[in-house]
Image (tube, helix red, strand yellow):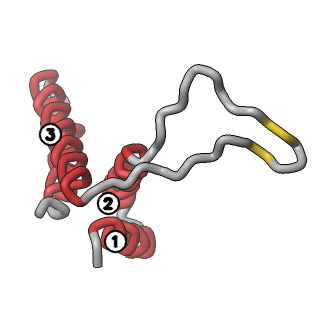
Amino acid sequence: MNITDRLRADLITAMRERDKLRVTTVRALIAAIDNAGAVEIDGQGFDYDPKIGLNHDVDRRDVTIDDIQRIILSERDDLIAARDEYRFLGDNDRADELEHRAEIVATYLA
């Protein structure tokens, strides 16, 4: 099972268990990986034909396992940085939540 399949399976499990924190965290990881596959468009936009829809459709970029690991690492680092900021501001409840989310994200690092 690859990492994206594992994330999607874990999302379903978290939803069944009503684990809101895990659902939020896993959804954010899936979105970050999906966004990495997006293709940049030029400034010209798209032509639209109501009979066939959008023209100039292109395939998404391939996202390698190394790309995915970098994305996951970056997400974890962002959560840790935000946790530190909230601790500095004295909001320990929010800091604890972010720390828990960072721990969830870390489980997907190889």
Residue 7 locus on image (x, y percent) = 33, 66
Q: From the viewer's perspective, is residue 31 above or below residue 65?
A: above
Residue 18 locus on image (x, y percent) = 41, 68
For the residues labelled 2 and 3, the Cα–Cα distance comes to 17 Å
Kind of residue at disc 3: Asp
Front residue of this view, candidates 105 and 30 = 30
Along the polypeptide, which appears first: circle 2 or circle 3?
2
Q: From the viewer's perspective, is residue 92 above or below residue 64?
A: above
Of the numbered discs in the image, which one, if any, rests on residue 10? 1
Which of labels 2 and 3 is toward the front? 3
Q: Is residue 38 left or right of residue 32?
A: right
Q: Is residue 31 left or right of residue 71?
A: right
| Residues marked 2 and 1 touching at CB (< 8 Å) | yes
User: Quarter of the image holding residue 83?
Assistant: top left
Kind of residue at disc 2: Arg
| Residues marked 2 and 3 touching at CB (< 8 Å) | no
Q: Which residue is mark 3?
A: 77
Kind of residue at disc 1: Asp
Of the numbered discs in the image, which one, if any, rests on residue 22? 2
For the residues labelled 3 and 1, the Cα–Cα distance comes to 21 Å
For the residues labelled 2 and 1, the Cα–Cα distance comes to 9 Å
Residue 58 locus on image (x, y percent) = 57, 47
Query: In which quadrant of the rendered image does the C terminus lie?
Result: bottom left
- SS category of the residue bearing label 1: helix
